[in-house]
Amino acid sequence: MAQEEQVLVVERKVLEQAGMFQGLMLDVERYLRRLFAPGILYFLPRSQAEADPAYKQLIPYVIMSNDGKYLTYIRGKRAGETRLVGNRSIGIGGHINPGDNEVPLFDTGFREMYLTAVEREVAEEVSVEAKHTDQIVALLNDDSNEVGSVHLGIVHHWILDSPAVSKREQMITQMAFMIPAELQEVRDTLETWSQLCLELLEK
């Protein structure tokens, strides 16, 4: 029998102590200091984490841009999160598993493991041939729906030096780079997290 997937989580009460928010939080470092403090993050079986809003699964959400245009795609039928199939997205990312913990034992706060996992998640879904910078620009919480209530997004902005990105995952379809105005025209087709991030791109 296959072992159940383990995912990295933070207890909701940790966020509540830091100050619970709805939507985007731009005061990033204040929250990251708490999240990556020793003993705060740990792994749970995914079935438990998906069903219990007392936990938030940590999800890197990587937005890529080149020359003012943002990578976007539609989640196909093979998407891992079935509740998001058919939606347009501007974020690449996914759950963080114990296999990502290929760093020294002194990384008790998981920060190095997390950054390694971000690179792995992106590489699983797309091939990025361009050089890039990586900055965490926001945290994203959306308790307005079933998916959001059990996930916490960490929004990264990768600025690419060229648009050299190709898909690896079959679940990624209709991939293109679009300016914010074009994304705004298809806003109703965007998944909730992407709608929230679009507001950030336009500022």
Image (cartoon, rainbow, N blue to C red):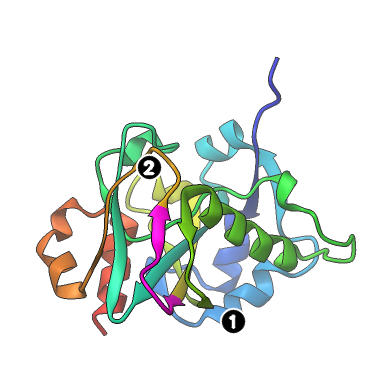
Q: Is residue 161 magenta?
A: yes
Q: Position of residue 10 (x, y in %)?
A: 63, 56
Give the residue type that dot 2 points to: Glu
Q: Which residue is mark 1?
A: 29
Label number found at residue 124: none
Q: Secondary structure beneath disc 2?
A: loop
Give the residue type that dot 1 points to: Glu
Q: Position of residue 137 (x, y in %)?
A: 46, 78
Q: Which residue is mark 2?
A: 146
Q: Residue at x 63, y 63 (%)?
A: 14
Query: For residue 196, what is the image quadrant?
Result: bottom left
Q: Secondary structure beneath disc 1?
A: helix
Q: Residue at x 13, y 59 (%)?
A: 186
Q: Looking at the image, can residue 38 be seen?
A: yes
Residue furthest top in the image: 1
Q: Residue at x 40, y 61 (%)?
A: 165
Q: Position of residue 63 (x, y in %)?
A: 40, 67
Quadrant of the frame with the C terminus: bottom left
